[in-house]
Image (cartoon, grey):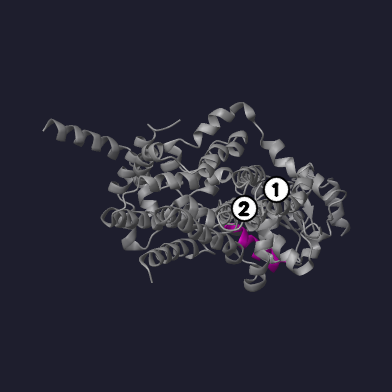
Amino acid sequence: MSKKIVLGILIVVLAAVLRLIDLGNNPPGVYVDEAVHGYNAYSLLTTGRDEYGNPLPILLRSFGTYPPALYTYFTVPVVKLLGLNSLAIRLPSAVLGILLVAIVYLWFGPVVGLIVAISPGFILWSRTVSEPNLGLTLLVLGTFLSLKSLPLSFLILALSGYAYPAQRFLAPLTLIFLSYHYRYRKHWLLSIIVATIVLLPLVWVSLTPGANSRLIHLFEPASAARLYLSYFSPNNLFSRPDPDIQRSFPEVSIFHWWMFIPFVVGLIKSKKTGILKILLFWAILAPVPGAISGDYFSTLRTLPLFLVLAWVIAKGFPKKAIVIIPLLVLSLVELYSNMVLLKHERSSVWNYEYRQISHFISSHSQDQIVVDNSRFKPIYILWAFHSQVSPRLLQSRGFGGNYYSGFDFPDTLAFTNLAFRPINWREDVYARQYLIADLLAVSDSQAREHFLTLEDVITDLNGRPVERIFLTHPDKKCNVPINRDNPFCKQIVVQ
Amino acid sequence: MKKAKNIFIILLFFLSALDIDRINTRRGYYPHAVGRIFQNKVTESFTIIRKKAFSLFYF
C-alpha cells in the first residue's frame, strides 16, 4: 500500500473518531431543529407523511420556518435501523462530515484534509443535525466529480440546492460557473438538462411564501457590508466562537488559534501562486447569505467559505512531521477539553432537560398537564421526539390550505390531556393539573400564592434546576374567601 | 533585567483577570486528575492572552 493511501486512511479514521465518539450524548440533549428532522423522518417512515400529514415535502413546515427536508430523507433509513434517538438522527451528518474529509483529501491533498478533520467548526457541524453540512458536502462532492463525470456532478450540485436555504443561492451559481467553465466538455448539454430537471421543483417551491419566510424575516441589507467583512475577521475565525452558543464549542472558533500563523503565510503564498477559480468564487459569494441575514458572524450560513480558508491555511502549513505532530497533539487535547466543556456548559442550550420532561409526561398519561412555552414555542416537537408520539396524533392538526403558505405558528398546541401554551393564571390554577415551567415562568411567590406544590425539579447535566413541575390545588385556591365567587370555583363545587 | 520585570508585570496583569471560581467549577467537569491539567491558572491565563491578542485582529 502506498504512503499516500495510508496517510489518507489515517486522516479519515481521525476524522471519524472525532465525529463519532459519544455522538448520541455530546452535544447532550436534542436541539429543536434536530428533533424536527428526526421526528419527521420517523413520521415519513411510519406513515409516508410528515408531521402535518403532507406526503413527501420539499420543505418541512416545522414552526413556519420551512427548513429543507433533504436531511430528513437521509435520516429515514437510519431511524429505521437504529430507532428514533439522538445517535440515529446525527449519524447521517457525521458520515457526511467524514465523507467531506475524504473528498477534500482526494481533491486538495492531505494537509487540507487534516485541517478539515481537526478544525472545531467542521467537527461540531458534523456532530449535530446540520443541513448546511449536508449542503457543503454535496456542493464539494458535486464540484469534485465535475473532474470525472459532468452529468453526475451536475445532478449532485442541483441536489445540494435542496439541502439548505443558503445553498439555493450558491448551488445554481456554482452550476452556472461550471457550465461556462466546461462549455466544450462532452455531455455538457445533457448535464445542464439533468440539473434543470432536478432544480425545477425547487424553483417552484422557492416561489411560495413559506420558502421565503426566513429570508423575509431576516433580510437586513443595511448592515450587509459590515457583516460581510466579519466573516474574514481573524478574531472570529481563530479565537471568538460563533455568537450563537448552539453553533460553537465553548472558547474556540471555527479553526484552532495556532492556524492563524499558517493562514497568514498561506495568504502570502496564494498571492504568488494563485487560487483555484472555483475556490475564489465560493470565497467571494459564500458570505453573502450570512451578510444579508442581519446576524453577526452566522457561521452556518457561510460554510463553503471555511473550506476555502482551510485550503489557504494548508498553503502556509509547514509540511514537516516535527511541526505537524505537536500541533496535532495540542489540537486533539484542546478538542477533548472543549467536548467536555460543551457537554457540561451547554446542556440546557441543547434541551437536555426535555428528555426528562417527556418521560414525566409519558408516565402521567391519565393526568392533565400544561407545559409552559412562553419563551420557547416549538417545544412540542421535543416531546414528540423523545416520547415517539404517534405521527397520526400530530397529523390530526392538518395544515389547512396550501402547505407552503402558512408561516404563523400558534401559541397553543393542545391534545386530550396535554397542552403546550403559556400558563393562564386566571384559569389554570382552578383545575387539577400539572404545570411544567422554567424558573422564570413560575416564581416561588406565585407558587405560594396559588397553592402549587412542587412535585419534581428537572435539572441540567450539572444538577442545576432548570424546569419545575408543580401540581395545582384548586380546592385550596377556592377555599380563599376572595375566590369563592370565581366562576371556576363554582364549577369545582358542581363537580 | 528590565525585560524580565516587564514580563512579570504583564503576567501579573493577566493573572489578576483570572476567574478562580470558574476554574474550580470547570475542573469538576473532568475526571479528577485530568481536570487539574485542563483547568488551572496557566491554561486560563493563556486563554485570556489569546483572546486579548486576537482582539487586535478584529473587524
Residue A83 drawn above or below residue A276: below
Where residue A473 sits: x, y (%)?
Answer: 73, 56
Q: Residues within 10 Å of mark 1 (few under 14, many from 20)?
A: some
* Amino acid type shown at disc 2: Glu
Circle 1 is placed at which residue position? A377
Q: Could you classify mark 2 by the number of other residues whose Cα lies within 10 Å: few (under 14), some (14-19), or many (20 or more)?
A: many
Q: Point out the stretch of residues depicted in magenta.
A: A352-364
Image location of residue A104, percent across then percent down = 48, 55
Q: Secondary structure at mark 2?
A: helix
Seen at 62% across and 72% down, the residue is A82
Kindly report which numbered mark, 2 or 1, lies closer to the viewer in this rendering: 2
Quadrant for the N terminus of chain B in the image:
top left
Could you tell me residue A78's position as x and y percent? Answer: 63, 68
Mark 1: secondary structure = helix
Name the one closer to the observer, A424 or A121: A121
Spot occupied by residue A100 in the image (x, y as percentages of width and height): 52, 57
Magenta span dominant secondary structure: helix
Looking at the rendered structure, the number of numbered marks drawn on it comes to 2
Q: Which residue corresponds to the image point at 24% horizontal and 37% vertical from the top-left? A: B12
User: Upstream in the sequence, badge 2 or badge 1?
Assistant: 2
In which chain is the residue bearing label 2?
A: A
Q: Is residue A356 magenta?
A: yes
Q: What mark, if any, has residue A131 been given in the picture?
A: 2
Q: Same subunit under labels 2 and 1? A: yes
Asked whether residue A471 appears in the rendered view, the answer is no
Name the residue at 79% across, 62% down.
A49
Q: Are marks 2 and 1 in contact (CB under 8 Å)?
A: no
Q: For residue A332, which quarter of the picture?
A: bottom left
